[in-house]
């Protein structure tokens, strides 16, 4: 009998398991509201749908260059010019099959097995799981109120001292999932400078750009030419299922990424690239959705503490409330399961994001409609009483 690899023994992504259970319940007629997975309930922008329809009428969808179409890369370069005043060579851009593929490509091209990479705890669980599956050493650095819920040069130094390692990479999301932390310009610069001075690759996950509600939104590209920037059409652009994202790379990393991408993915999906190119110009429509997340955020900031769920971290960006559930339980996983079974509201247990203290927390996505979010919170309020 063949054996199963040790590298595949990663934690399940519990949010996806909760989503699967919510989908099963909905299919059998339950009025489920899901705040479990970070995806907008809105469709892709109209222009993206129109472009995709037109491409389907033409009919032929094929492979593209491994790093994406010239049109999309040029449109992304224009995006950086308009939004950030940056002049980015389109040849430094790699289009990817969602940012998830970007992580695989970046980790494989930057690191060898056993290299140490720092991530924030709590943080996005797939970082830990991908790094683990690739045989990298995961250095989880706690982020708390003392570090303004982000990584700092000092916390990275401390983690290296305690772990007896030298870091090869640092990965930071801003705005962050699940904490909502927006790392300000100065703090981001301090991290980028620390990484440059110590020959550490700095990977900046900017997937929640466009969804900053408090504080300043800075791309690492404004601060250094050395950052590896990862981004996606999944969140602000409402295109989760299209599986399309991009990276901006230092020039010397482009060819290594291209070589790995050629064999791992051949190319990102052409239909999604066509739709994504059109989506970049749909900001008027997308900003209407953004405004509805902002109203959801205001509502949750007010209402959650009233019902006993205190907010555990900033909520400055992305679309999550990370709440402390210790008034009700020490086992957020059990609470999430009961909440789904008894009142048909799905949220994600904190364990996904924080294997040490996640039993005390739960993450609620507010990317759904305002009516849904209000209904979910009222169900929870009655239930918790
Ligand atoms: C911080 C962060 N990065 C990356 C992703 C993956 O996104 P995608 O592969 O859809 O681009 C997510 C999804 O929730 C996320 O929260």
Image (cartoon, rainbow, N blue to C red):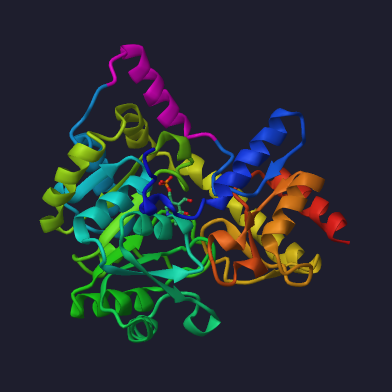
Magenta part mainly helix, strand or loop? helix
Residue 383, picture quadrant:
bottom right
Q: On the rendered image, what quadrant is the C terminus found in?
A: bottom right
Q: In the rendered image of this protein, does residue 267 appear above or below residue 99?
A: above
369 displayed left or right of 160: right
Is there any visible trace of residue 127 in the rendered image?
Answer: yes
Q: In the rendered image of this protein, does residue 315 appear above or below residue 107?
A: below
Q: In the rendered image of this protein, does residue 8 appear above or below residue 315?
A: above
Q: Which residues are the magenta region?
A: 43-61
Residue 315 screen position, x and y as percent:
58, 66
What residue is drawn where x is 24% and y is 61%? Answer: 113
Residue 99 screen position, x and y as percent:
36, 48
What residue is drawn where x is 19% and y is 80%? Answer: 197
Residue 98 screen position, x and y as percent:
37, 43
27 displayed left or right of 39: right
179 displayed left or right of 94: right
What residue is drawn where x is 52% and y is 51%? Answer: 13
């Amino acid at each position: 009998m063949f054996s199963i690899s040790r590298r595949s023994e990663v934690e399940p992504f519990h949010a996806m398991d909760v989503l699967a259970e919510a989908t099963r319940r909905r299919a059998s007629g339950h009025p489920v509201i899901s705040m479990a997975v970070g995806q907008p309930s809105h469709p892709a922008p109209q222009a993206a749908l129109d472009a995709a329809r037109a491409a389907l009428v033409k009919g032929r969808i094929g492979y593209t260059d491994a790093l994406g179409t010239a049109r999309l890369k040029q449109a992304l370069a224009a995006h950086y010019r308009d939004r950030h005043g940056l002049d980015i060579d389109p040849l430094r851009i790699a289009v990817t099959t969602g940012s998830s593929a970007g992580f695989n490509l970046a980790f494989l091209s930057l690191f060898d097995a056993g290299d140490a990479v720092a991530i924030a705890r709590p943080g996005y669980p797939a970082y830990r799981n991908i790094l683990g599956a690739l045989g990298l050493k995961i250095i989880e650095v706690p982020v708390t109120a003392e570090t303004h819920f982000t990584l700092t040069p000092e916390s990275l130094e401390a983690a290296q001292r305690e772990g007896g390692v030298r870091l090869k990479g640092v990965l930071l999301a801003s705005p962050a999932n699940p904490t909502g932390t927006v790392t300000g310009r100065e703090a981001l610069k301090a991290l980028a400078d620390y990484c440059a001075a110590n020959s550490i690759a700095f990977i900046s996950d900017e997937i929640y750009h466009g969804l900053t509600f408090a504080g300043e939104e800075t791309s690492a590209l404004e601060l250094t030419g050395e950052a590896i920037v990862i981004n996606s059409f999944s969140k602000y652009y409402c295109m989760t299922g299209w599986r399309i994202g991009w990276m901006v790379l230092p020039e010397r990393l482009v060819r290594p990424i291209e070589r790995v991408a050629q064999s791992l993915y051949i190319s990102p999906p052409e239909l999604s690239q066509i739709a994504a190119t059109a989506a970049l110009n749909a900001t008027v429509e997308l900003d209407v959705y953004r405004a509805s997340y902002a109203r959801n955020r205001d509502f949750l900031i007010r209402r959650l503490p009233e019902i006993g769920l205190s907010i555990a971290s900033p909520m400055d960006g992305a679309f999550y409330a990370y709440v402390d559930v210790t008034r009700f339980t020490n086992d957020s996983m059990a609470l999430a399961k009961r909440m789904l079974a008894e009142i048909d509201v799905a949220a994600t247990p904190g364990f996904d994001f924080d294997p040490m203290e996640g039993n005390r927390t739960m993450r609620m996505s507010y990317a759904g409609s305002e009516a849904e979010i209000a209904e979910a919170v009222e169900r929870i309020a009655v239930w918790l009483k």
